[in-house]
Image (spheres, helix red, strand yellow):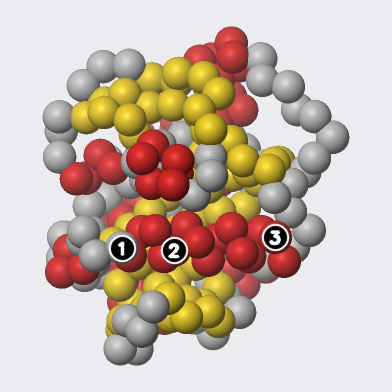
Amino acid sequence: MSAEFQDEYSAKELSKKTWPDLERLFKKPGVGDAWWCWCMHHHHRSHSLPENKRLRTRAERAVRNRREKRELVDKGYSHGILVYAKGEPVGWCQYGPREELPRIDNSPKYRKLALEDGKDKLWRITCFVVDKKYRRRGVASATLKAALEAIRNKGGGLIEAYPVSKTDQGSNYLYPGTATMFEKAGFKTVAPFGNGRTTTVVMQRTI
C-alpha cells in the first residue's frame, strides 16, 4: 500500500520489505521507548514474570522485543504504517485486529467498562512513533489517516484507540496519540480510561 499526504509525506504498510525502515526509525535518537519496546506491549496478553526478572535492563528487553517483532512481521501477525519524508522513515502507527493486540483485554480498568462488542470486527490503534526532527508537522496525523485507509481496505469495522487527553509528563507519554488528533479523524470518546498525571480515554469510530 502506498498513499501520498500533501507533497511531503508518503506511507507504506509494515511488511518484510519495509522492516528495515522500521528498524531505522526505532534506532533513531529521541524516539521515546520505541528503541527497546518495539511496540510489543500490546501483542502480549500479560507480563511473563519469570522472563521479566531475567531481563532486567531495557537493553536486554530491546534484543528480545526486536526479535519477537520481526517474527510476527514474518508471519503476517503485525500491522502498522510507516510514513516517509523524502524517502526517510519519520513516523509509525501500529494497528491490528483485537486478537493480534489482546493486552488491553486483560486490564481490570478496561473490563470494568464492559463495552459492547457489537457485530463489527474490532480493530485497535495503539502506538505512534515520530522522528524528533518531524514532530508538530502532521506526521502522526498522516500515519493515522493511512491506518484508517488500511483498515477500510481490509473490510473495516469498529476501531478503538486509547489516546491521551491530558498529561504534564512530556512528549514521551503521547505514544498512544492525542484525543484531539483522533477527534479530528472522526472518533468519539466513549469512556474515561486512566487518570493521574496522564489521563487517557477510550475512543471509537466505525468504518
Q: Is residue 67 left or right of residue 103?
A: left
Residue 143 has which mark? 2
Q: Secondary structure at mark 3?
A: helix
Q: Secondary structure at mark 1?
A: loop
Q: Who comes first in sequence, dot 1 or dot 2?
A: 1
Q: Mark 3 to mark 1: distance in Å?
A: 21 Å
Rendering coords of residue 19 (x, y %): 47, 77
Q: Is residue 91 left or right of residue 157?
A: left
Q: Which mark is residue 138?
A: 1
- Residue underneath mark 3: 152
Q: Amino acid at mark 2?
A: Thr
Marked residue nearer the N-terminal end (2 or 3) = 2
Asked if residue 167 can be seen in this view, the reply is yes
Q: What is the three-letter code of the residue carrying label 1?
A: Gly
Q: Residue at 25%, 39% (x, y): give it.
A: 173
User: In 3D space, how far apart are the residues under numbered discs 2 and 3 (Cα atoms)?
Assistant: 14 Å
Q: Position of residue 131 (x, y in %)?
A: 23, 66
